[in-house]
Image (cartoon, grey):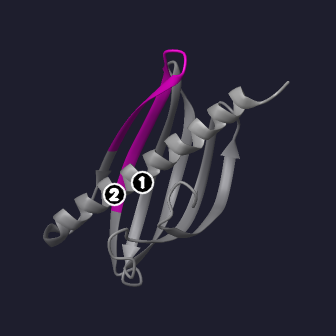
Amino acid sequence: MMKLNPTIEEFNILKESGNYEHWKYWVEYTEHLSATTWIKNHAVGQYSIKRSGHGFVIESKHTTCFMLGMNCFYTEAEFFFERSGDHDTRCIETIHYQCPLGFIGMCEGEVKAQRKLIMGNLRQHFSTLHTNKHNKKV
């Protein structure tokens, strides 16, 4: 997880259940904001990964707390992905998040920065896998 999102400093799986068809896990993590690295938060998340149509969907719910748990906010997200053509993947991500009124610009900037970073790291990871697969000598 830290490879995909370098703002995460600690990541612990608390519990997991399920199988290949529907896997669930609960995590806690600490991360810093991408633009202001000295601001940290602690979060607890629940993830559900399952088949959906011709692809898979990752649903997650997070409670993210700042200032030693005095200010907590809720996020729900859905990340759907499926094959598109022979070599591509189509991804659709929907995120609903809470943010204090005076910090809307900062929250929006943080969400956009993290999404861009994570998608870039996913592309890099899978393009490396694809390249290594085709460059292997048999």
Tell whether position 111 is magenta.
no
x and y, in percent, of residue 4 in the image? 53, 54
The residue nearer to you, when weighing 91 against 55, is 91
Q: Which quadrant of the figure contains the N terminus?
A: bottom right
Which mark identifies residue 113?
Answer: 2
Residue at the left extreme, as displayed = 102
Image x and y of residue 15, in percent: 66, 57
Which residue is at 58% across, 38% downward? 126
Q: Which mark is residue 133?
A: none
> Image quarter for residue 40?
bottom left
Residue located 50% across and 58% down the image: 5
Question: Number of callouts in the render?
Answer: 2
Q: Please, what is the three-letter code of the amino acid marked with disc 1? A: Leu
Circle 1 packing at 10 Å, graded few (<14), some (14-19), many (20+), is: some
Q: Is residue 20 above or below residue 53?
A: below
Q: Are marks 2 and 1 in contact (CB under 8 Å)?
A: yes
The percent position of residue 86, horizontal first and vertical second, equals 54, 15
The residue stretch that appears in magenta:
74-94
Q: Which residue is mark 1?
A: 117
Image quadrant occupied by the C terminus: top right
Q: Residue at x 44, y 39 (%)?
A: 79
Secondary structure that dominates the magenta span: strand
Task: Check disc 2: other Cα within 10 Å, few if <14, some if 14-19, many if 20+.
Answer: some
